[in-house]
Image (cartoon, helix red, strand yellow):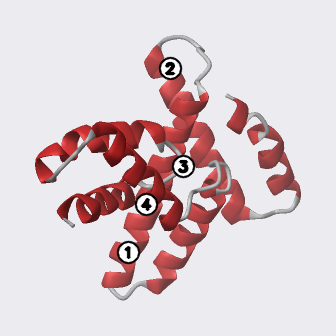
Amino acid sequence: MGILSNLTEEIKSAMRAKDSLKLESLRAIKSAVLLAQTAKGGGAELSDEEAIKILQRLVKQRKESASIFRDQGRSDLATPEEAQAEVIASFLPEQLSEAEVAKVVSEIIIKTGAEGMKDMGKVMGMASQELSGKAEGKMIANLVKQQLSS
């Protein structure tokens, strides 16, 4: 659980600073981690991959909520959700740019010999595995579709 190793210290410093938004975000992370650990059975440590998946899910939930709130004209509710997403995302490894992801996807297409949309599953499988935690799945899928259809 290397990427979440300083979570408790971050919670303490947010308490000291009386930063309620950050504290709420950090507690959400801790809650999700504890739920995942108990679901696995016992107090088993989470691997970095599992922790990254949890963090990505939390960020995605916050962004979707913020989007829904914005659609409903509730920016007063959307703003805290977006801020929480940023706090949670700060624990994730640095995300690759779209150009970097496109380069990796094109290398995978060349490696697999994919020739069209019929090979999308094969390419997506490898790309998702290679870019896990480094890029959003939606961006990967869009780039794979774009490159396979051209």
Which of marks 1 and 2 precedes in the sequence? 2
Identify which residue is drawn at 79% across, 39% down.
6
Badges 3 and 2: C-beta atoms under 8 Å apart?
A: no
Which of marks 2 and 3 precedes in the sequence? 2
Disc 3 to disc 2, C-alpha distance: 26 Å
Disc 4 to disc 1, C-alpha distance: 26 Å
The amino acid pointed to by label 1 is Ser
The image shows residue 130, relative to residue 120, as above or below, that is above
Q: Give the percent coordinates (x, y) of residue 48.
A: 60, 31
The image shows residue 122, relative to residue 103, as above or below, that is above
Q: Which mark is residue 102?
A: 4
Q: Which mark is residue 67?
A: 1
Disc 2 to disc 1, C-alpha distance: 31 Å
Badges 2 and 1: C-beta atoms under 8 Å apart?
A: no
The amino acid pointed to by label 4 is Ala
Disc 3 to disc 1, C-alpha distance: 23 Å
Q: Give the percent coordinates (x, y) of residue 1.
A: 67, 28
Identify which residue is drawn at 44% across, 21% down.
39
